[in-house]
Amino acid sequence: MTIHSLASILEKAINGNYAVGYFESWDSYSFEAILETAEAEKSPIIMGFGATMLEDNWLNKNGIEFLAAGGRALL
């Protein structure tokens, strides 16, 4: 699965007259399940992850870039 900008995903959806689902993963299992399902369906998705599992102190210390790197590694 590849990562695309939200703007490009939504532009294609508008032009193709279809919706794009947003899915929130709560742990690594739901993260993998969401990705596997999107790949099987060959469907673009918007996925949120991680921030609900983190304390503010951790996020402030490590930053969103660290969290994004973790998500990219799971792809």
Image (cartoon, rainbow, N blue to C red):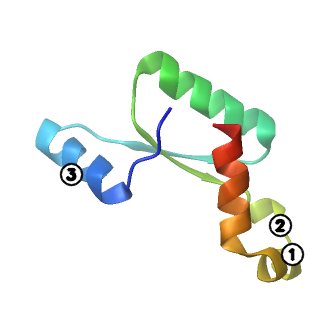
N-terminal of the two: label 3 or label 2?
3
Taking depth in this image into account, of 1 and 55 the one nearest to the observer is: 1
Between the residue at mark 1 and the residue at mark 3, the CA separation in whole angstroms equals: 34 Å
Q: Quadrant of the C terminus?
A: top right
Amino acid found under the numbered disc labelled 2? Leu
Residue at horizontal 23%, vertical 43%? 13
Characterize the local packing of mark 2: few (<14), some (14-19) or many (20 or more) Cα atoms within 10 angstroms: few
Residue at horizontal 79%, vertical 40%? 28
Q: Is residue 72 above or below residue 1?
A: below
Q: Which mark is residue 58?
A: 1
Give the side of residue 39 with respect to residue 56, left or right. Answer: left
Between the residue at mark 1 and the residue at mark 2, the CA separation in whole angstroms equals: 6 Å
Between the residue at mark 3 and the residue at mark 2, the CA separation in whole angstroms equals: 32 Å
SS label for mark 3: helix
**Res 34 → quadrant:** top right
Residue at horizontal 75%, vertical 48%? 26
Q: Are marks 1 and 2 in contact (CB under 8 Å)?
A: yes
Q: Residue under circle 2?
A: 54
Q: Which mark is residue 11?
A: 3
Q: Where is residue 1 shown, x and y percent of the image?
A: 50, 32
SS label for mark 1: helix
Q: Where is residue 53 shown, x and y percent of the image?
A: 82, 60
Taking depth in this image into account, of 26 and 61 the one nearest to the observer is: 61
Q: Where is residue 54 shown, x and y percent of the image?
A: 83, 66
What is the number of callouts on the image?
3
Q: Where is residue 35 shown, x and y percent of the image?
A: 59, 31
Taking depth in this image into account, of 63 and 37 the one nearest to the observer is: 63
Which one is closest to the eye, mark 1 or mark 2? 1
